[in-house]
Amino acid sequence: MSEILSYTQRRVLEAILALFQEKNKAITSEEVSSRLGDLKPTTVRGAVRKLKQLGLIESKPGPRGGYRPTVKAYEFLGLAVPGTARLRLLEKGKELSVLSMEIHYYPDYIKIIAKCLTIPRYVRPVEAVEIELLPQCRISGELSSINLETSEVIIVARRLSK
């Protein structure tokens, strides 16, 4: 599907997702235009028409309206749908709050970059973890790297069936 979107359409989609994550409300074309800086609201609305046709966003007209990303948009960009991912530290029996997750698929493994609310100092690389992408996918692996400043962890994993 990536060939279907133009460069501008992809930028608009990414901006809508980022703004929606920040504000948790419908996003207007003016907000997207302001975020991107070089696109006018009319250009944004043109890109949105295609995104709506593909089912990547939904819109609500009116003064309290705007655009919201669909589950298909998160899947298209390889991101975890908010509220559907859990990251558990197996040895410590603790769970980290995941804000967003990028998933990169390779032939032999999966690389996951998870942005967490916070990462406790006791979390160390090579720790065994389990990621559950609700409702059906469970991924088991180990922490490859941890960035305490940005609260990001990189996990290298292999896929397990549930």
Image (spheres, helix red, strand yellow):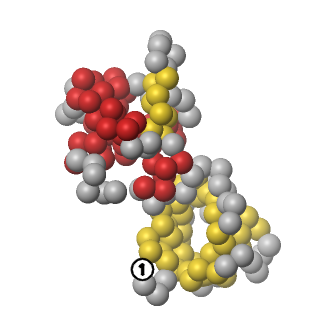
Q: Is residue 78 above or below residue 53?
A: below
Label 1, on which residue?
106
Q: Is residue 70 above or below residue 115?
A: above
Measuring 73% from the left and 64% from the top, which residue is drawn there? 95
Instruction: Report the side of 136 relative to 45 (left or right).
Output: right
Pick out the residue farthest to the left.
Answer: 38
Measuring 44% from the left and 71% from the top, which residue is drawn there? 104
Q: Quadrant of residue 35?
A: top left
Q: Amino acid at mark 1?
A: Tyr
> Residue 86 placed where, x, y %?
68, 62
Q: Is residue 88 above or below residue 60?
A: below
> Residue 61 placed where, x, y %?
46, 18
Q: Quadrant of residue 155?
A: bottom right
Identify the element where label 1 is drawn. Answer: loop
Pick out the residue farthest to the right.
Answer: 93
Location of the N terminus (image quadrant)? bottom left
Instruction: Report the side of 54 relative to 63 (left or right).
Output: left
Pick out the residue farthest to the bottom.
Answer: 108
> Residue 26 placed where, x, y %?
50, 28
Instruction: Report the side of 160 relative to 36 (left or right).
Output: right
Measuring 39% from the left and 44% from the top, which residue is drawn there? 54
Q: Front-most of 47 and 29? A: 47
Q: Front-most of 102 and 77? A: 77
Confirm whether residue 120 shows in the render.
no
Measuring 26% from the left and 30% from the top, which residue is drawn there? 46
